[in-house]
Image: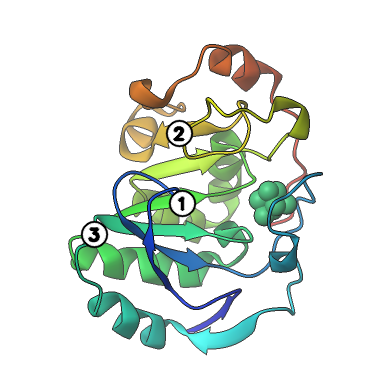
Amino acid sequence: MKVRLAANLQPDSIVDGEGVRAVVWMQGCSHNCPGCHNPITHDFNGGFLTDTEDLKRDIRELKLVDGITLSGGDPMFQIEASLDIAKFCHECGLNVWCYTGYTFEQLLAISTKNPKMLELLQELDVLVDGKFVLAKKSLDAQFRGSSNQRIIDVPNSLKSNRAVCIKKYEIKDNIKNQLKQEEVPIFI
Ligand code: SF4
């Protein structure tokens, strides 16, 4: 399956989720968060096209990683490729984190129209959700850029039909920020 990437598989990150992680940098994002740290990943025709089978070969060769992180760009703009990669990672015994500019609630709404979105959510262990908000940029926000973004336990959230944040990553104003989360237009 075709996938558009911003970079080759990064085998060794300690800032894109818990433990040592390999990062898949997906190309394409239209959230346009002011202050985005990675604007080169926005263009849907940028980066390079490859095949998920090639990526799987690289993932199979990884050693000593705890899991895979889907980042970008926004992996939610390539639902089927993200699903294919996430499924494969689980088959290999790797946990899957995913970053997105959408909120968990928006993704649930999308999944009522697009069953592949629900399938993708079912293949994620952790979702880091929401746009990067420059005014809420925080050094206390581990594994994310701004305090409005949540680190969500996806299996528990799907069971409870509401976003369940992972307690150890919660920061003081996170709950208030969830309620005030900026509206993000749905493009999918
Ligand atoms: S969602 Fe992420 S990649 Fe997209 S504009 Fe916002 S910070 Fe940048």
Residue 165 visible in the picture: no
Q: Nearer the viewer, residue 45 or 9?
A: 9
Measured in 3D between alpha carbons, the distance from the residue under mark 2 to the one under mark 1, in whole angstroms, is: 10 Å
The residue wearing badge 2 is 151
Ligand 1 has an atom within 8 Å of the beta carbon of the residue at disc 1: no
Locate residue 78, reporting x and y percent. 57, 67
The residue wearing badge 3 is 94
Name the residue located 33 percent from the left edge and 81 percent from the top edge: 58
Measured in 3D between alpha carbons, the distance from the residue under mark 2 to the one under mark 3, in whole angstroms, is: 18 Å
Locate residue 93, reporting x and y percent. 18, 61
| Vertical side of 136 occupied by 88: above or below | below
Q: Quadrant of residue 153?
A: top left
Disc 3 to disc 1: CB gap under 8 Å? no
Mark 1 neighbour class, 10 Å CA radius: few under 14, some 14 to 19, many 20 or more: many
Measured in 3D between alpha carbons, the distance from the residue under mark 3 to the one under mark 1, in whole angstroms, is: 13 Å
Q: Which colour scheme is used?
A: rainbow
- Residue type at mark 3: give it: Leu
The residue wearing badge 1 is 98
- Residue type at mark 1: give it: Cys
| Vertical side of 30 occupied by 166: above or below | above
Name the residue located 69 percent from the left edge and 25 percent from the top edge: 181
Q: In which quarter of the image is residue 9?
A: bottom left
Name the residue located 76 percent from the left edge and 57 percent from the top edge: 30
Locate residue 111, reporting x and y percent. 53, 49
- Residue type at mark 2: give it: Ile
